[in-house]
Image (cartoon, helix red, strand yellow):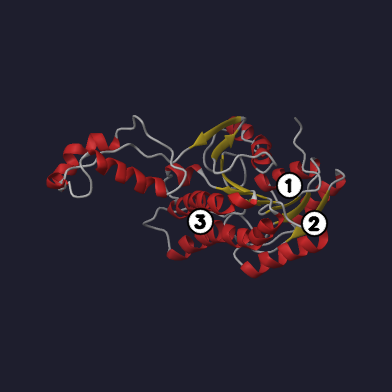
């Protein structure tokens, strides 16, 4: 089976370098028409450059079709304009890869609320702006493939990245609701947690050999699969250096505690049962938590027990 993107139109944000550049080029190689969006700033979000234009030139040199866009993902009107121009030129948008991002790393004690808000605005609100701009179009097309870019920081935490982690885990939650709302219109939504050697990670103290192994080119195959016609949906996937894995938000069976024992001391007494992972499940919607609570209560005689 060969995965092709012929007649597909893709938008990749933050595609002027690193991961986004790799995605854009690989999509174009397989036939996609690609919008290369990049504000062109440094990794902290400052400054401008012609990075997007250079990637477009690379794609055209390979025989592909691409156009640049310098809009900021934090500006909803600019993202709407980007989508409108894309539709005018190529007739639709089939793929959106939300990849744009910045870092403002500091321990929470030293972090300003300005740095908190900016990082959340670029990563979380930026992805929402881009997604909103294509959502109704994808519903009308009855086809859409959207990829959010999360992070191990969002999934598992990382010292000095409270703002980044909050935004990244928010994107995983965003995915889960969009997956439910888009299913009837053949819109599939997934979350990627990449591990790559880019300007975002170049000074994190990785051994040089490992940094070099973390080429964005090793993440791109997973990305292209996750936005392909036969892509899965509602997945959280990690990718880096040729190693790939899935992450899940799970729920333990837990325990229903009789009314007389519903005290802090009762919680402490039942703590090991509450956190026991034997038989844990992977809920597909929030309603499954309520259903699990009702089932647990039924075992002890219902709501009044």
The residue tagged 1 is 24
Crowdedness near tag 1: few (<14), some (14–19) or many (≥20) residues, C-alpha within 10 Å: many
Residue at the image point whose x is 71% and y is 55% from the top: 141
Identify the residue under disc 2: 67
Earlier along the polypeptide chain: callout 3 or callout 2? 2
Residue at image location 17% in from the left, 43% down from the top:
258
Q: Nearer the viewer, residue 19 or 200?
A: 19
On residue 146, which mark appears?
none
- Pick whichever, 30 or 45, lies toward us: 30
Tell me the SS state at disc 1. Answer: helix
Is there CB contact under 8 Å for labels 3 and 2? no
Badge 2 density bin: few <14, some 14–19, many ≥20, Cα 10 Å? some
Residue at 35%, 48% in the rendered image:
290
Q: Position of residue 177 (x, y in %)?
A: 51, 52
* Mark pair 3, 2: CA separation: 29 Å
Q: Earlier in the sequence, mark 3 or mark 1?
A: 1
Which residue is denoted by mark 3 in the rendering?
104
Quick one: SS at disc 2?
strand
């Amino acid at each position: 089976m060969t995965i092709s993107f012929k007649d597909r139109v893709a938008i990749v944000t933050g595609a002027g370098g690193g991961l986004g550049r790799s995605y854009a080029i690989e999509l174009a190689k397989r036939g996609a028409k690609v919008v290369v969006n990049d504000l062109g700033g440094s990794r902290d979000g400052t400054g401008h450059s012609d990075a997007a234009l250079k990637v477009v030139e690379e794609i055209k040199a390979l025989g592909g079709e691409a156009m640049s866009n310098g809009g900021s993902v934090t500006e909803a009107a600019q993202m709407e304009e980007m989508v409108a121009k894309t539709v005018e030129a190529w007739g639709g948008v089939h793929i959106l890869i939300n990849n744009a991002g910045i870092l403002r790393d500091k321990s929470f004690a030293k972090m300003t609320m300005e740095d908190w808000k900016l990082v959340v605005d670029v990563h979380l609100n930026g992805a929402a702006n881009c997604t909103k701009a294509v959502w109704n179009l994808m519903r009308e097309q009855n086809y859409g493939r959207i990829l959010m870019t999360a992070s191990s920081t969002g999934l598992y935490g990382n010292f000095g990245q409270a703002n980044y982690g909050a935004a990244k885990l928010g994107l995983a939650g965003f995915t889960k609701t969009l997956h439910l709302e888009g299913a009837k219109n053949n819109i599939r939504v997934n979350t990627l947690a990449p591990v790559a050697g880019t300007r975002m990670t170049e000074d994190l103290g990785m051994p040089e050999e490992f940094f070099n192994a973390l080429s964005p080119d090793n993440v791109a195959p997973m990305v292209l699969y996750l936005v392909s016609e036969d892509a899965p949906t509602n997945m959280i996937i990690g990718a880096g250096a040729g190693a790939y894995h899935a992450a899940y938000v799970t729920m333990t069976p837990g325990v229903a505690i009789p009314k007389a024992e519903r005290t802090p001391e009762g919680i402490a007494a039942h703590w090991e049962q509450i956190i026991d992972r034997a038989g844990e499940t992977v809920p597909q919607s929030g309603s499954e938590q309520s259903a699990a609570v009702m089932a647990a209560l039924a075992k002890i005689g219902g709501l009044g027990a």
